[in-house]
Image: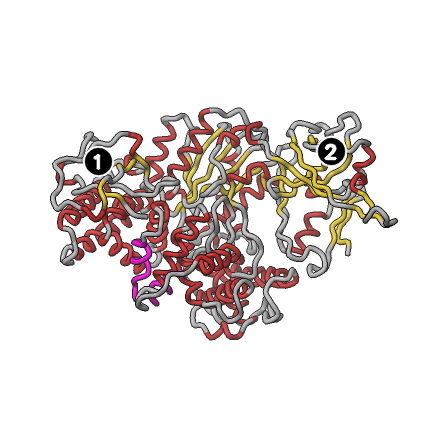
Amino acid sequence: MVVWEDTELDAVLLKADSALVGANLGVVRWGELVCDYPERRPVCSMSGFPKAMRRRVSSSSKQYIDDLKTVEGIIAPHTGSRSRLYGLEVDGTLPTDVKNWQGLSGAGVFCNSVLIGLARLVDLQWDRTLMVVPLSHLLAADGFIPAVAAHTGMIPSLQPADLRPLMDNAPDPQLSSTYLLDPRSQVTELTGVNGLVRQIEQWCKGPDRVDVAAVTGLGGTGKSRLLVEVLHRLTTGAGDQRPWSGGFLADHPSHTDYQVLAAANYPLLLAVDLAEARLPQIRDLMAALAASHDGATVRVLLLARAHDTWWPALRRHLRTRSVGPIGHAFTLTPDNALDGHTAEDIYVEAKAAFARRIRLLRKAGHGDGTWPDRVVADAPRRYGADVEHSTRQPVIYLHIAALADVLAHANPDFALNDHPMEVLLANEVEYVRRVAEARLPAGTADDKLLRSLITAQFLAGARTAQEGRAAIRAGFDTHHRGYGVTAPPDARQLAALDDILTAAYPATDGAHWGAVGEPLAAAWLAEVEADSGEEFIEAFLQHDALATGQRHQTLSTVVRTAQDQPGLSAGAHRAVAADPERLLPLAVQTVTTELSTDHARQWLSDLEHAVADRAADPDCDPDINQWAASLISEAQACTSDDRDVQELIGAPLPRRTTPRNSRPRTRPAATPTLSSSNRRSVGSPGSSSLSWASATWCWSRPSPPPSLSPPALKTTVG
C-alpha cells in the first residue's frame, strides 16, 4: 500500500505486512553526512540488482536470475554539493558498460548502518561515481514527515551518520517499559520549559566557535527530553540557515578521535549525560576541540543532577585551555514542566501518547499472541486517580502513573500491583521473558535469576564481551549466594545468558550491551537488594571477576541511585569497609566528584561508621583499617573546607607490587616511589588491577604524611 510518493524524487513510501516483507529485519535509522575528516571518512554501501548481475540459472537453462550486488565506496562531502547530491566513489570492480548499472537505481545507501540516501544515477563522465539523493530531500518533501509519523508514531529525524561511532543512539522500538519511558523515544510531548528552550537556543547561536554549559536538575525533571527538543528545533532549521546536527555523546564510543567533531560542516550540539561521572572524557573532548577547530560551531551541554562540586573546577580547567567563555549554567526544576500546564493535563496527554505508541508497536509485530488488544487512551484511573491534587514533583512520576494505567487496563494481572512502578516492572519482566524464551529451552527461563543479571548489567556495564562475561559471572554467583555450594555455570550457560541480556538491552553506543532504563533500574535494584537480605550490592562489588572499571561504575551507579533510595548505600559502605584496598580509592573519588557537597559529606560519614564497625571484625587488618579511616577523614576535610577537588579527578593510582596473601603486618615507613610507566588512572580502559590511591589527592604538598601511607602494596586479583 502506497502511503506517500513523490514523482520528482522518484520515491514512494510503502506500508506492508511485516510478516511478509521485512520480517526479522532491524530498525533502519536515517541520517546524513555532516563532517569532512579524511582520516575517519566512513565506507558507504548499497545493495541492488544491476543488469550486470543478471545470469542464467544454469548453463542449460533458459531461465535467468537477477542476482544481488553490494557496492561499497567513499562519499566526499563536497562532491555533487551544488546539485545537492552525494557522489559515491566506487571501490572495487566496475561493469564494462555503464548500462549494466541499470537496476541499482533506488537502492538505499548506508553509512555506519544508517540510511543516508537513495542511488539516483551514474555520472557518465566519471566511471567510478554514482550520484545519490540525500535523505534530507525526502524529509523536505511535502507530506513525507506526516506520513511517517502517522504510521510509526515518531517524527523522522536525521542522525549524523559519520559521527555514529561517537554517539549514543536512540533505543530500538520495543514493547518494554524501558523503551516507552526513554526520553529519546519521544513518546510523550515536552511540556513547559519553553523559556528555557529559547535560552539554550540563543546560547547555541552565540558568536563563539566552541562553548560549554551545564544543565542541572533532579532526576526525572526532563533534562534529556529538553535536549532532544532543543536539537529537534535546531535540526529543522529555518529559512536559509543551515540546520544543526548532533546528539548524545557515547559513554563508550567506538573510537575517541574527537578531532572529527572539529571538522564538522554543520553546527553541532552535543550532550553529555551524567556529566559528573564522565569528567575525564569531557576534558579529552574539549582538548580536541580547542587544539584545532576549522569546522562549524560546536556547543556542548553537560547534563547532571547538580553542579556545585564538579562544574566550578571543570570550568576553571577548561578556561585555562581557552575553550570558549563557559559562562552559562541552566537549571531545570519540577515547576518548569508545569509551566502553562496542570498535572492533570500532563497525565491525560501522556496516557494518550503511551496508548498510541503501544498500538503502533503491536501493529509492527512487537509483543506476542498473549498480549491483549485493549490498549486505550481512556483507560480507567487507578494509579493516576489523584494527580490533580498531587504536589509538584518531577514530571516522570506523572508519566509513570499514566503508563501504569494503560498497561494495567491492557493486562488485568498487572492491576494487582499496588504501586505504578510495580506495574512497569511487571511489564518489563514479561518483555525479558519473551526474549529469554526465544533463546532457551522451553520452561527453563528463571525470572528471578534474569532480574539479578539485569541488575548486574545495570550496575557494572560492559565495554567488551569479556567484561560482559565477568558481569554475568558476578551476578550469577551473587544471586546464588546463601544457597550453599553451587556448581559454576558452564561456558554455554554463560553465553546463553549473555545473549539474552544483549538482545533485551542492546548497546546504543560502542559498548558490549546497554541496560534497563532508569528509574526502572533503580526500583529493580532496590527489589533485588531487599530479596537478598541487603547483601547483593555488598557481595557483587567484591566479586573477583569484575574489572576495576566495572567496580568504579558500580560504585558510581549506587552513589547516584542512593540519592533517591538512601537504603541502597549501606551495602556499598560495607563492601568498601570490607575491601578498602580495592574499593576505598574509587569510592572517595566517586563521592567527592559526583555528589553535591552535602550528599558527599553524608556518604563519607556513613562510610566512616562502616569502617569503624569493620574494626571489630576478628579478620580485620588493623593497619589497613586505620589507613582507611585516615583517608576518609582527609576526604571529609576536603569537602568541609570546600577545597579544590581537581586533584581527585582522574588521580593516578600506583600499582600494588606484593601479593594480597603476603600482606605485611607493619606499615612501611614511606609510600613507595613508582615510575610513571607503572601508573594508571582510576577506571582506565584495560586496567586489570586497582592500586593504592595517592593520599595527596587534596593536598598541595608533594608527598603524603606517613600516617596516611597505605600499609602495604599488593597485587589485586581480577
Give the answer, above or below, for where 649 lies relative to 512. Answer: above
Q: Residues within 10 Å of mark 2 (few under 14, many from 20)?
A: many
Q: At numbered mark 2, what does the secondary structure look like: helix, strand or loop?
A: strand
| Residue 578 visible, this orientation | yes
Residue at image point 31% right, 31% down: 677
| Residue 384 visible, this orientation | no
Find out whether residue 533 is within the magenta segment: yes
Residue 162, by quadrant, is: top right
Give the answer, above or below, for where 154 lies relative to 534. Answer: above
For marks 2 and 1, the one nearer the N-term is 2
Give the answer, above or below, for where 577 lies relative to 687. Answer: below
Task: Please identify the dominant SS of the magenta region.
Answer: helix
Residue at image point 65% right, 60% down: 364
Which is nearer the eye, 10 or 238? 10
* Image disc number at residue 381: none
Residue 650: % across, % down: 32, 37
Question: What residue does disc 2 label?
Answer: 131
Q: At numbered mark 1, what does the secondary structure look like: helix, strand or loop?
A: loop
Which is nearer the eye, 307 or 65? 65
Residue 133: % across, % down: 72, 37
The answer for how far apart the CA atoms under marks 2 and 1 are is 61 Å
Question: What residue does disc 1 label?
Answer: 696
Check disc 1 and give the amino acid type. Answer: Thr
Give the answer, above or below, for where 470 lies relative to 141. Answer: below
Residue 93: % across, % down: 72, 32
Check disc 2 and give the amino acid type. Answer: Met
Q: Is residue 135 left or right of residue 657?
A: right
**Which region is colored magenta?**
523-543
Which is nearer the eye, 536 or 714? 714
Find out whether residue 528 is within the magenta segment: yes
